[in-house]
Image: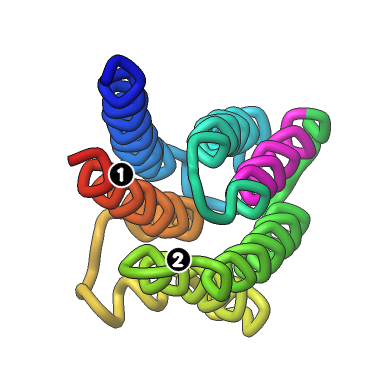
Amino acid sequence: MATEAHSRFSEGSRALALRVAGIAIILLSAGALLLPAGKHIASDMIGALLIAGGLIEAVAGSLRRQVRPFAMTAGGVTALAGLFFVLNHQTHFFPTATLITLWLLVRSLILAAASVETRGSVRLWTALAATMDLLLAVLLIAGLSITTLIISLFGPTPWLIASFAWFVGASFVANGLLLLEVASCEDEAAS
């Protein structure tokens, strides 16, 4: 009986940690909106954001029952992309777009593989996160400006909102929502 109580506590703690991680990543997406728009984006700012998101995702991935290696690898890829930004202080728009495109493509492949291995509602959310990253990468590959997309969908917006930071922010939101769904499933398993 003590073992069962300990197991429930650890599962409840796991759900709470996953929920906190999901909320933290969604909050980081708000930080992405604070990145300056334009052709010169501070690489340290992008790097710090990606490193933080990647580390949170890797820790959250270590708590997952299903697809733990995929989830941790996706976080590692995000942190590695951030490290490239921190180490390259001369990043300008084109290299930034290329690195972000590669990051999104790799993440979409990892998440797509993870979606095949998951079960239940988490499979749908994992597939949605993979699709979001793939679509964002395709937009960058096609050269479609996020500003054009945002203005087309929502009309004229302030320059800050219509910046390149929406790519990072959109990926973070999808990932945060995925983690919130995983936390919800952990809560159900604990009860």
Measuring from the top left, give residue 119's x and y in whole percent. Answer: 42, 69
Which image quadrant is residue 110 in?
Answer: bottom right
Q: Residue at x 45, y 66 (%)?
A: 126
Q: Which residues are magenta?
A: 72-86
Q: Is residue 35 above or below residue 139?
A: above
Q: Which residue is mark 1?
A: 186
Q: Which residue is mark 2?
A: 126
Q: Nearer the viewer, residue 142 or 11?
A: 11
Q: Nearer the viewer, residue 41 or 122?
A: 122
Disc 1 packing (10 Å; few <14; some 14–19; many ≥20): many
- Residue 96 magenta-highlighted: no
Q: Earlier in the sequence, mark 2 or mark 1?
A: 2
Q: Amino acid at mark 2?
A: Thr
Q: Nearer the viewer, residue 46 or 110?
A: 110
Instruction: Give above or below for 38 relative to 157.
Output: above
Q: Amino acid at mark 1?
A: Glu
Residue 120 position, x and y percent, is 35, 69
Quarter of the rendering containing residue 59: top right
Question: Is there any visible trace of residue 24 in the rendered image?
Answer: no
